[in-house]
Amino acid sequence: MVGRRFDAAGELGNAFRVLSDRWTLALPTAIASLVIGAIIFFVIGAVLVSGGAALVLGHTGAALAALEAGATGVALAIGLIALVSTFAHAMVMAAAHEAWADRDPDYSAAFRLTMNRFPALVVLAFLNALLFAIPVALSFLVIGIPLLFVVGYFLMYARAAVVVGGEDPISAIGTSFRLASTHVRPSLIAFAGILGAFIVARIVDLFTIHIPGIGLLTSFFVGGATAAYMALVEVRFYELLRDRVPAGEALKER
């Protein structure tokens, strides 16, 4: 069975409408963006500043020591960022399923569902990281950069397949690849919307993250809204293209 026909470009606009009508959908990702911004500024930033300051003063040994000492903290910070982002994104996805069905999101149910799906989402994040490892390693070559986009395109439905479809991580990757390869035109439009929201968030971060207070505020509002929009688009296109569970059906904790 193939997904029903729909206006893919129009659905990107509908995602904005749903988000503006039910702006609380952005709260989980907004809080996560605030936490992530604080981690980057206070943890990772502190390590880079201390190492950079020592290097500027000509103390190369001290700079290397500072970076080495902070390596563990940075690694833990990156892991925490991944966990916080994964949980918040999944919670918005669970709530977005209800919003797209024109029901008020039940955030307590979304939280319980996210807790239920979280182990699978962590495994999925690890598998995704492995799949991205090759294009990242090749990023210093011209071929590495387009490969990043190709991998991202084929994996864009995987999280929705876990959260909404209740699939295991490996099956979710297979489902995402199948949907993206058999429904190319709507998937490319969805990917363009997701990528556009991601780029907007990163540009804002680039110019504001180093500004005390302002950086955290933009992380909360802009980061939260763009991440929620990305989750809405992922869920909507996954539900329109899949052929297993009818869109609008209540999710089960399984």
Image (spheres, rainbow, N blue to C red):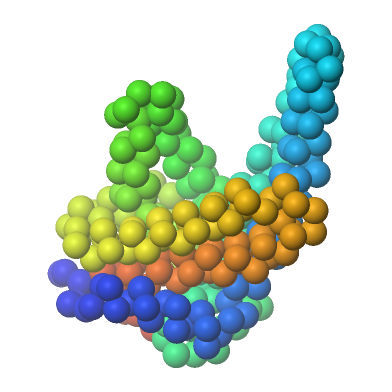
Q: Is residue 252 visible?
A: no
Q: Is residue 236 left or right of residue 114?
A: left
Q: Nearer the viewer, residue 53 or 252?
A: 53
* Image-quadrant location for residue 91: bottom right
Q: Is residue 103 above or below residue 237?
A: below
Residue at the image position 36 percent from the left and 73 percent from the top? 12
Q: Is residue 50 left or right of residue 208?
A: right
The picture places residue 9, in percent across and down from the top left corner, at 28, 73
Q: Quadrant of residue 31?
A: bottom right
Q: Position of residue 127 (x, y in %)?
A: 46, 40
Residue at coordinates 74% horizontally, 37% vertically from top-left? 44
Task: State how many labels appear.
Answer: 0
Residue 217, horizontal then vertical, whole percent = 72, 64
Q: Is residue 64 above or below residue 166?
A: above
For the N terminus, give its image quadrant: bottom left
In front of the other: 238 or 118 = 238
- Do we see residue 217 in this rendering? yes
Q: Is residue 64 left or right of residue 200?
A: right
Residue 49 position within the rendered picture, expressed as x and y whole percent measured from the top left:
79, 32
Question: Which of these two is toward me, 128 or 66?
Answer: 66
- The residue located at (66%, 47%) in the rendering is 81
Picture layout, residue 77 above or below residue 243: above
Q: Quadrant of residue 101?
A: bottom left
